[in-house]
Amino acid sequence: MSFSELVLAPWVLWLGGIVSLLFVGRALSRRPWRTLVADHGLQHRWLAATVVVMLFWQLRAQAVDWLTLHLMFTALLTLVFKAPLALLSAAAINLAMVLLGRVEWPLIGVNLLVTGVVPVLVISLVWRLVDRRLPDNLMVFLFVCAFFGSALSALGSGLAAVGLMAVGATDPQAMHQALEYARFLPLLMPSEAFITGMLMSILMVYHPDWVATFNDHRYIDTK
């Protein structure tokens, strides 16, 4: 989901832009381009995934004038490419939405916060939990990270949007609509979880080396 019209106070837009910019700066400080330069196959996969997700974002439902609902795929990008590249993909996609005229440019910061920063943080925390605390089991990785983690990231994204409306909505009616939308979050989470889990299952079977967060030797070869 993302904002499509200016229903937030200017200070919220500025704060969202600053927070998003800080996280993008943090991602760039990890120098993810070094991995891209060294691996031509990764370049093609990352660029193709970014373009495909941007195209999928065009398939969205206009719940109300200021809010659009769509699959994010941020959790999938994070699991496949890790957080820095996933966040850069989200930034590029949000910028493309502005350039295509689908979103007003002052919203790019808060939209990146909702569709990029928050879901990347949530799925990264879930992955670290699985990586460090849970057994080295293929099904544990698949269900906890891909299915449960992506559902949690969608929930975090929705709650972040509602939270922004709660602190900075300029229209009381829009705030009421946001609370109504929050009731449907449990219904929207399964779709994100199913798509992410299905695609991760395919990748882990046919191309486990493409999934940066998945160690096929650890989860498959040692069993």
Image (spheres, rainbow, N blue to C red):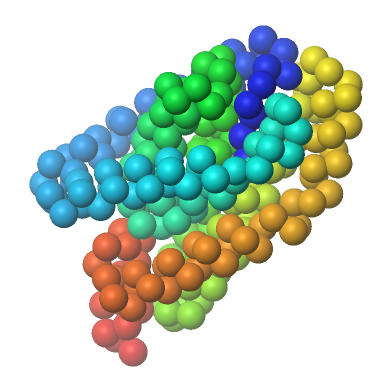
The image quadrant of residue 211 is bottom left
Split into 4 quadrants, where in the image is the N terminus? top right
- Front residue of 61/188: it is 61
Which residue is situated farthest in the top direction here?
Answer: 10
- With respect to residue 92, does 128 lie above or below? below
Q: Point out residue 168 in the picture as x, y percentages from the top left corner.
A: 76, 19
Question: Is residue 171 toward the left or the right of residue 87 in the image?
Answer: right
Q: Point out residue 218 in the picture as x, y percentages from the top left corner.
A: 31, 77
- Front residue of 161/213: it is 161
Residue 102 in view here:
yes
Identify the residue shown where x is 48% and y is 80%. 139
Q: Point out residue 197 in the picture as x, y percentages from the top left corner.
A: 50, 68
- With respect to residue 167, does 216 lie above or below? below
Split into 4 quadrants, where in the image is the C terminus? bottom left
- Front residue of 33/219: it is 33
Identify the residue shown where x is 62% and y is 50%. 154
